[in-house]
Image (cartoon, grey):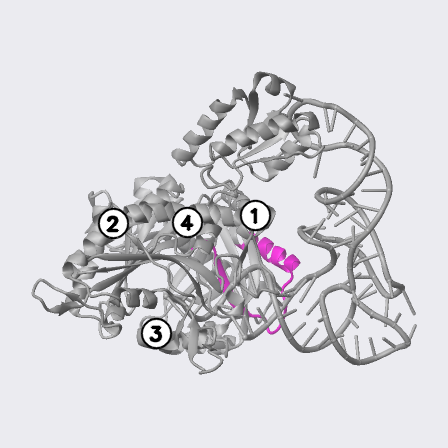
Amino acid sequence: MINITFPDGAVRQYEQDVTALDIAKSISEGLARKVLAAKFNGQVVDATRPITKDGTLQLLTWTDADGKATMWHSSAHLMAEALESMYPGVKFGYGPSLENGGFFYDVDLDGRQISDEELRKLEVKMNELAKQNNAYLRKEVAKADAIAYFKEKGDPYKLDLLEKLEDGSITFYTQGGFTDLCRGPHIPSTGFIKAIKLTNIAGAYWQGNEKNKMLTRIYGITFPAQKELDEYLTLIEEAKKRDHRKLGKELELFAFSEKVGLGLPLWLPKGAMLRERLQSFLQKAQLESGYLPVITPHIGSKQLYVTSGHYEKYGKDSFQPIHTPEEGEEFLLKPMNCPHHCEIYKASPKSYKDLPVRLAEFGTVYRYEQHGELHGLTRVRGFTQDDAHLFCRPDQVKEEFIKVIDLVLYVFKSLNFTDYTAQVSLRDQEDRSKYIGSDENWERAEQAIIEAAAEKGLPTVVEYGEAAFYGPKLDFMVKDALGRKWQLGTIQVDYNLPERFELEYIGPDNKPHRPVMIHRAPFGSMERFLAVLIEHCAGKFPLWLTPVQAKILPISDKFVPYAEKVAELLKNAEIRAEIDDRSEKIGKKIREAELAKVPYMLVIGEKEETDAKVAVRRQAKGDLGTMDIAGFINLVQDEVINRKPFE
RNA sequence: GCUGUUGUAGCUCAGGGGUAGAGCACUUCCUUGGUAAGGAAGAGGUCGUGAGUUCAAUUCUCAUCAACAGCUCCA
């Protein structure tokens, strides 16, 4: 008998070689029908794998991320089976599940193109095979036998993969007539897959190396019920509607011009208004938190970046140096603000009593991003960071971290981002040689970050080996209204730049000491953040940010003078309003204001003029009835002061 | 940068070897209308750019640029 501990702490006894599926059955048949895999002692395994020793067991279903991943991985095998039956001789590369949902398989179709129609046929075939409810069977194979199998089959990619595997650790999985080299785990049988959608086809190099052959990558996603597939498809549609590139054009926020150059966004008046409001919001919060605004030029001597080390590392990926006409001195468009800020720190001697020094700048930087990487506002070549650098003593790192976390959370709360996690990136525990800075300082900083995150009650994920060579960091991963994850704010400790720039402060011992530098940006980049914000709120910005808060709509030309009077009163109350004074019918004016997502529409006609009132209409909600102008101003101001979200 | 798809009016898109079309937007006129599109007329395009094939190219071919999807990259 063996002892199995469940997540709730309960311990039960089972026969040796019991499977997770057996255990599920012993609890309830309903549960057994949902178990996709199991986590035994922290490792995800087949639910059908015999358990030989004591341990903790968690049954994984569709509600668990690992359960989903297992099913998608198994779906990739199902697609491979369908592919093999439809295109005999197809060779298989790599077919994993994807973190953001779904799976793909890289296949070599010998130059054959797959049409959309064929993709639909492939789906039909997959459904057929899924209904056969074939079990996924695991088999341990000797390396020589595995090589023989794929030689016989003629699959060079699998042989390639096999080369790197050690004898004794090789397993095959077979379902129906398809056998694949695979570590697993898999779901018990294909019948768990009830709804299938193959989403798109793309090229991908074998092993991600562009010197290798380009394979056909087929993407798909599966679900345990048709309803969930439908919901997924609705979500995709909604994401398309919210695409910031589309909304940016429709709402006249920003534009691109080939003449200006790739990846260089042009902010139109409405977009600029939005961005400036966002910027002044953060500026105000930063002033209150003791930041000192600074301003630095857009270019810097090449020597500055040689000193910082960035020239060596990224020089080739930057815009090439520009030169002074006479002396031929080299300058770079600044790819980051920190070297400039280091020089500001050095402009005057510092005492330990001066620290921390918090230098903040909305600094525009230019980076040469690869052509194929440019994407709307999320990946551009010129962008503005809401940058700040905190220079502090090693013992102040934790306190500063807490303050930054407070600021970031205040920003998120104000913009209605309620779902976030902190990703803490620490050193590789195996190899510490690749990091700069003393062991003691790293230890201290890593501890400080972990403690700060814990004290603030942040949901935290710790990633070892993800730290930059110059220091540990904390990144904020935010989920938007559609549940998509974005990396927004970042806080990074840096031991490298203080060293390179020989930054110092005089300690109580009257000796020079090296300060610690913290880089931080709650938005990251204004461009990217606005892109995320646009998609998060579907272009319906909260009233305090939105470029046009109210549109005044006179019923006919006769009421334009009264409309102007109303506009004047709103302007005095710092409400951003525009008049639609065209000779159009009220229905049309309302329609256009609705489509422009203007939060408030003020309909003005004879009744309103006589009573000195306005008829208020709320976007997407409809008529709110008439109120006097002071009443409307109160309504708006209340919404603005409390930073209410749009709805 | 690599692979694939696309490029026609300000926007969304149709068309197709014989030098172009719709809807919306725009301009003018009529209309002054009470909560999501009033009517009429008009203007607007070297069909991304360059070359080739052809009697003839916006249409076919090649190159190039850009956008999109994916890969690789991201201080």
Cβ atoms under marks 2 and 3 closer than 8 Å? no
- Using a 10 Å C-alpha cutoff, classify the residue at mark 4 as few (fewer than 14 neighbours), some (14 to 19) or many (20 or more): some
Please name the amino acid that badge 4 sits on.
Gln
Chain of the residue on which disc 4 is drawn? A
- Using a 10 Å C-alpha cutoff, classify the residue at mark 3 as few (fewer than 14 neighbours), some (14 to 19) or many (20 or more): some
Please name the amino acid that badge 2 sits on.
Lys
Chain of the residue on which disc 3 is drawn? A
> Can you identify the residue that label 3 sits on?
A304
Q: CA distance from mark 1 to mark 3?
A: 40 Å
Cβ atoms under marks 4 and 2 closer than 8 Å? no
> Can you identify the residue that label 1 sits on?
A247
Seen at 28% across and 51% down, the residue is: A404
> Can you identify the residue that label 4 sits on?
A279
Q: Which residues are magenta?
A: A100-129
The percent position of residue A415, horizontal first and vertical second, equals 40, 42
A391 relative to A152, above or below: above
Label 4 element class: helix
- Compare marks 4 and 2 and give the one earlier in the sequence: 4
Foreground mark, 1 or 3? Answer: 3
Cβ atoms under marks 1 and 2 closer than 8 Å? no
Whether residue A177 is in magenta: the answer is no
> Can you identify the residue that label 2 sits on?
A403
